[in-house]
């Protein structure tokens, strides 16, 4: 089952954006590095701030945003890909990345839709 629970914003300066969102949301990030900051909102929705120079495929200028759907495992991502490939424009084929297995589609207006299964926690 797909869950809408993660919003990813392309940002020029994650530290500056984190300062803004920490103040705005009155919460601190659960993860922070020079290239990525992650918040978990009280309702469980995640907000990620990723440096725009490292996002693949590269985001469009100004206002780059992805609506993300998480899946339970890699097989579920593949099933969703097979379901969506004839319904949406695929802009990134399924691929293993640092954070897990993913693909990206676009809706008719060009909004990016990322489906992913997180990588296994090595702990």
Image: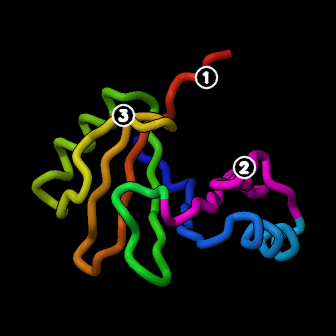
Q: Earlier in the sequence, mark 3 or mark 2?
A: 2
Residue assigned mark 2: 33
| Contact flag, marks 3 and 2 (Cβ < 8 Å) | no
Which secondary structure lies at badge 3?
strand
Residue 29 colored magenta? yes
| Contact flag, marks 1 and 2 (Cβ < 8 Å) | no
Is residue 81 depicted above or below 4 in this figure? above
Q: Earlier in the sequence, mark 1 or mark 2?
A: 2
The Cα atoms of the two marked residues, 1 and 3, are separated by 15 Å
For discs 1 and 3, the disc positioned in front in the rendered view = 3
Is residue 101 depicted above or below 109 in this figure? above
For residue 123, which quarter of the picture?
top right
The Cα atoms of the two marked residues, 1 and 2, are separated by 18 Å
Q: Which residues are magenta?
A: 27-53
Query: In the shown orientation, is residue 14 left or right of residue 10?
Result: right
Residue assigned mark 3: 96
Is residue 106 depicted above or below 82 in this figure? below
In percent of width and height, residue 76 lies at 33, 33
Which secondary structure lies at badge 1?
loop
In percent of width and height, residue 63 lies at 49, 81
In the picture, the disc for residue 38 is none
In the picture, the disc for residue 121 is 1
């Amino acid at each position: 089952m797909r869950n809408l629970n993660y919003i990813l914003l392309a940002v020029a300066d994650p530290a500056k954006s984190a300062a803004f969102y920490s103040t705005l949301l009155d919460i601190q990030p659960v993860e922070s590095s020079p290239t990525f900051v992650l918040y978990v909102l009280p309702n469980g929705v995640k907000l990620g701030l990723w440096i725009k120079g490292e996002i693949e495929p590269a985001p469009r200028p100004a206002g780059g945003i992805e609506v993300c759907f998480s899946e339970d495992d890699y097989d579920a991502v593949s099933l969703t890909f097979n379901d969506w490939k004839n319904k949406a424009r695929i802009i990134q084929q399924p691929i293993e990345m640092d954070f897990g297995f993913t693909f990206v589609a676009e809706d008719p207006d060009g909004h990016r839709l990322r489906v992913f299964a997180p990588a296994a926690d090595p702990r």
